[in-house]
Image (tube, rainbow, N blue to C red):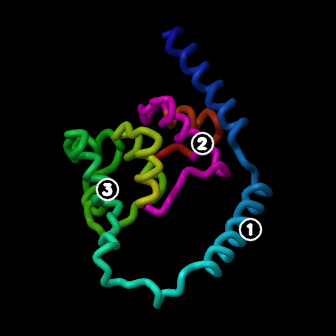
Amino acid sequence: MEATSTLFKQLLENVKKYIEKNYLPEPFRTFNQASMRRMDDMAASMAMPESSVDRGSKLLPSFEPKSFSRALFDLIDARDLTDVAVYKKAGIDRRLFAKIRSDNYTPGKETVFRLILALELSLPEAKELLEFAGFSFSRASKLDLVVKYCVETKHYDLAVVNELLFSNDLPILEY
């Protein structure tokens, strides 16, 4: 039991260092949002007029965006997992998981985090799944940084992640 306690203390210390190194407080976040808006405005002013794009062209591939649901179930299938195994490991009830199966449902960020941990996704896969739900890891959120650290270091156990969150006075990923 002593070894487990020591390992957790070391993990907790590493998480605290990671947060210290990567956390961007509010003033930086505001600056970055303003900069992004200016860049978006510049990009829009340089964009090609809509009328100059030939929508019937055979050269442009047809692009049908994938839904969060499709992306999630592709990952589940690729790992040869069952839906039941995933939603149980993620601490999600069957009814919510049935809603997620619908292309019209977008889960909350914490639900996506639980699915990322349950599927044991790599960081690029986790970022992509978050994007399908309209989210990203934020350097302005300590909760996001803890989850990102756990994904980067392959600590996928939801109980351990929740203990790290709790130990940092952050809300846990509810079961």
Q: Can residue 175 be seen from the camera position used here?
A: no
Residue sitting nearer the eye, 30 or 146: 30
- Read off the magenta span: 133-160
Is residue 96 depicted above or below 47 in this figure? above
Residue at the spot of label 1: 34
- Disc 3 + disc 2, Cβ < 8 Å: no
Q: Is residue 158 magenta?
A: yes
Task: Identify the secondary structure beneath mark 2.
Answer: helix
How far apart marks 1 and 3 lie (CA) works out to 31 Å
Q: In this image, 15 relative to 99: left or right?
A: right
What SS does tag 1 mark? helix
Of residues 172 and 110, the one drawn nearer to the viewer in this rendering = 110
Whichever of labels 3 and 2 marks the residue nearer the N terminus, that label is 3
Horizontal and vertical percent position of residue 43:
63, 74
The quadrant of the image that shows the C terminus is: top left
Q: Which residue is mark 3?
A: 71
User: What is the three-letter code of the residue carrying label 1?
Assistant: Ala
**Residue that label 2 marks:** 145
Q: Quadrant of residue 104?
A: bottom left
Q: Is residue 91 left or right of residue 152?
A: left
Q: Is residue 86 left or right of residue 5?
A: left
